[in-house]
Amino acid sequence: MRAVVLVSGGGTNLQALIDAIRDGRVRNTEIVCVISNYAGAYALTRAKEAGIPACAMQPKSYGSRKEFETALTERIREIAPDLVILAGCLLKIPAELIAAFPNRIVNIHPALIPSFSGQGYYGLKVHEAALRRGVKVSGATVHFVNEELDAGPIILQKAVEVKDGDTPEILQRRIMEEAEWQILPAAVDLIAQGRVSVDQEGLVHIR
Ligand code: GRF
């Protein structure tokens, strides 16, 4: 399975995928390209160190948002991956890209969707909201991407305990270590094995 990974920041989820492929925990999968919407993303360094072709495609380098979205979609179409993986990607995915890859784009969200998801819930904001609400468990979700933000079919979730005295940073780190870095590779492996399907009601079944 040929995968393109879209990133925006530190790339720890990308690194988890790279390590899992190397260790055989993600089978018959190759990351053929990493694309970042921010040239300074450390994720690009991680890709290069792993010998993976990587590039930045920054919206501000294009005449308009539409031009950027068309260029990004065309670039991914040219690469023709079997799967597009959003790993710490803070980019609004163009509708034309979603339409070109129905149920073939996956995202990792740092909460148990539908909690703390949707517009405005990204990065530390997710964990700040969880702590404000006083939830006793949070976690992460891997889901297929559709046109509604964080609302596509759920593939895997993993719960993580929220501990008394947690700061957003501490909770974020625990969720990354105990959930994100586990379930994103696991979901990619399941998809690569052909074990994931989505039914008419948009529910995911894993064989
Ligand atoms: C993390 O908060 C992750 O939950 C979210 O993006 C942030 C950075 O991820 N998906 P990464 O280290 O760039 O993979």
Image (cartoon, helix red, strand yellow):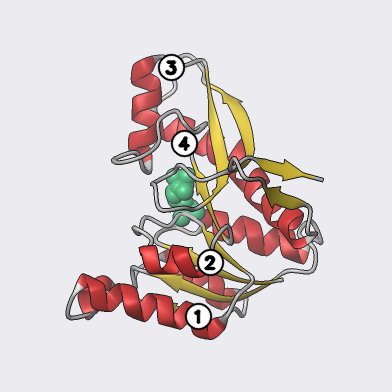
Q: Is residue 50 left or right of residue 26?
A: left
| Distance (Cα) linking label 2 and label 4 | 30 Å
Residue lying farthest front? 200
Q: Secondary structure at mark 1?
A: helix
| Distance (Cα) linking label 1 and label 4 | 33 Å
Marked residue nearer the N-terminal end (3 or 4): 3
Q: Where 191 falls versus 109 (above or below)?
A: below
Tag shown at residue 165: 3
Q: Is mark 4 within 8 Å of ligand 1?
A: yes
Q: Is mark 2 within 8 Å of ligand 1?
A: no
Q: Kindly identify which residue carries mark 2.
A: 101
The residue under label 2 is which amino acid type?
Phe
Q: Kindly identify which residue carries mark 1.
A: 77
Q: Residue at x 53, y 55 (%)?
A: 12
Decide: few, some or many residues near mark 2? Use Cα within 10 Å; few <14, some 14-19, many ≥20: many
- Give the quadrant of the C terminus: top right
Q: Kindly identify which residue carries mark 4.
A: 172
Q: Where 94 falls versus 120 (above or below)?
A: below
| Distance (Cα) linking label 2 and label 1 | 9 Å
Decide: few, some or many residues near mark 1? Use Cα within 10 Å; few <14, some 14-19, many ≥20: few
Residue 166 appears at what percent x and percent y? 44, 22
State if disc 4 and disc 3 touch (CB < 8 Å).
Answer: no
Decide: few, some or many residues near mark 4? Use Cα within 10 Å; few <14, some 14-19, many ≥20: many
